[in-house]
Image (cartoon, rainbow, N blue to C red):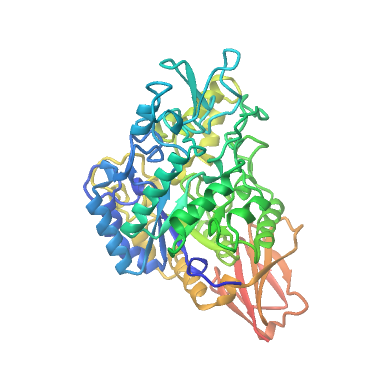
Amino acid sequence: MEKKWWKESVVYQIYPRSFKDSNGDGVGDLNGITEKLDYLAKLGIDVIWLSPVYRSPNDDNGYDISDYRAIMDDFGTMSDFDRLLDEAHRRGIRIVMDLVVNHTSDEHPWFVESRKSEDNPYRDFYIWRPARNGRPPNNWGSCFSGSAWEYDARTDMYYLHLFSKKQPDLNWDNPEVREEVFDMMNWWLDKGADGFRMDVISLISKDPDFPDGVPGINGYASFTEPANGPHVHEYLQEMRKKVLDGRDTLTVGECSGVTLEEAKKYARSDGRELNMVFQFEHMDVDADGSNKWSDKKMDLRELKKIMTKWQKGLDTVAWNSLFWENHDQPRSVSRFGDDGRYRETSAKMLATCLHMMQGTPYIYQGEELGMTNVPFCDISDFRDLDSINAYYELTGRGIFTKEQMLRFLRYKSRDNARTPFQWNSEENAGFTTGEPWIMVNPNYTEINAEEQMKRETSVFCYYQKLIRLRKQHEIIVYGSYDLLLPEDKELFVYTRALGTEKLLVICNFYGNTRCFELPEEWDSRKTKILIANYSDAAVEKTITVRPYEALVLQNRP
C-alpha cells in the first residue's frame, strides 16, 4: 500500500461560527480560531477542515455562497484568514477549505444575472426547466423539505435547488461553470490552502432527463436522487488535471448516496479523482426506514456489518474516511454511547473503535471533550434550517405531534453539534463575551476544555494518546482489518494485522458486563495493552469487559 501523509494524518473539523468569538459579537470568527491554534497543536491534530468562511447571506450557515473569493463579514477579513493560514502552517498544521460548488447562493452575481432572462449569458450557469403539466419538472425533494424546484415568475420557469431555495444548483454540464470553479480552486491553493473537503460533490452531475424518483414520507423523492450522475467521474478527473495534479493536497468528497462500487471510483488509489470520500451508510443505522426523524437506537450488528463492508471493500483499492460526528450530525456520545453515568467512558470507547480502523480519522470540534446533545426546550431554540422546516412540515401534515418532533430534534438535529465550543466554566463557556448566536449547552460548567486539559483521565487526554499512537504504530494506519463476533449484539471486536504484528480491538457499546475469550492464537503472556479506557484493565485468557470498556491489545511474536 502506498504511503501518503494524508493517510497518516488526523483531521479536525472547525465550524467557525461556534468555535471561538474574538470580538464579543456572539459569533465565532477567524481570529478566534487563530487564538486557539495552540490548543489544537496540543491535541496533536495535523489538519484543520474549515467549514465555509466565504461571503454568504447565511441562509444555510455559510453553505450558500455569494462570493467565493471573499470572507464572510461575521468571520473577519481576508488578512485575518491569511494570518490564520500562516500561524497554522507555522505549527505544522495544514488547512483544508470547504468547497461548496454543487450550488451557490441566490445572491451570487451569477444567479442574479441568470434569473433576469432566458437569453442572459449566465442563464445556463444554473438548471432551469419549464413546468410539467402545471407542476414542478419532477418529484425531487429538497434536503430542507418541500420540492427541489422553485418557480420564478420572471421567466415562467423553475430552477433546481437540492437544498434551500436560496441555494440554486449550478449546471456542471456547462464547461464555463467548470472553468470558473477550477479557476477559483487554483486561487485558494495558490494562496496556500492545503486541499478541499468537497460538499455534496456526488450530486454535481444530474441525469438530463430528470426522471421522477421514489417518493418518501413527505411525498418527494430524496434529494440524493441525482447522486453519482452520468458525468460526475469525468468532471472530477477534469478537476484533477486542471487543479490538483502536481499539488500535494488532501481531497475528501462528501458523497451522499454513494455505493461501495462508486466510492472505489471516487477515491481510487491511482489518484485520478479524490483521496477519500465521506460515505453516510453508518449514519443511517438509527433511521426509521427512509425517515431520519426518530429517536430509534441502532442495532450494533448492523453498524458492524456496514463498517466492515467499507473497511474490507476499500482495502488496497481506495481509502476510508473515519467519523462519528460532523456539523450535520448529532453528538456521538448521546447517539451511540451513554451521555449520563458513562459519558467519558463511552466517549473514549467510541474514539478507540473509530481511530483504530483503517482510514483517516476526522474529529469534530468538541468531540474530543465528549460534548453531548443539547436539552433544547422549544422550536425557537433551534437555528438549523433543516430542523425548523422539518418540524413545521411534519407537524403541519399531522405525521408527528409537536412533542414527538421536539423529541426527535433533541436526538437528531444538526444544532446539537453547532452550539458553542465549551472552553471553560465561565459565562457562555468562554466562547464569547456577548450574546451567543445559539444557546450554550448548560453542561459547560462540567464539560469544558480547561478542566479536561488539567486532568490526565479526561477524554481530551485520551484523544491525545490515540493520536500519538497513530504516529508511533504503522499498523494503525496501514494494517488490514478483520471483524470477529459479527452477530454479537454488544461487543464490537476486530483485528488489525501488518506483517507479523497484530492488534485486537475490543469495544463494549453497552452498559452490561461481558466475558470475552481471547482467540486461540493470542497468548495472554505475550500480549500487552496498547490503550484502554479503564485504568486497571488487564489481559487474561478470559477478559471481563465492563460497561463501555475499550481495550486495544498488541501481540508481537
In the picture, measured across the screen, residue 94 lies left or right of residue 264, that is: left
Question: Horizontal and vertical percent for residue 465?
Answer: 47, 71
In the picture, measured across the screen, residue 222 lies left or right of residue 431, that is: right
Q: Nearer the viewer, residue 24 or 148?
A: 148
Residue 274, placed above or below residue 414: below
Task: Name the image quarter holding residue 44.
Answer: bottom left
Image quadrant occupied by the C terminus: bottom right
Image quadrant occupied by the N terminus: bottom right
Question: Horizontal and vertical percent for residue 76?
Answer: 24, 47
Q: Nearer the viewer, residue 296 or 151?
A: 151
The residue under the point 39% across, 51% down is: 185
Question: Horizontal and vertical percent for residue 411?
Answer: 53, 41
Residue 291, placed above or below residue 14: above
Task: Name the image quarter holding residue 448.
Answer: bottom left
In the picture, measured across the screen, residue 321 lies left or right of residue 431, that is: right
Residue 438, placed above or below residue 544: above
Question: Horizontal and vertical percent for residue 81?
Answer: 27, 54
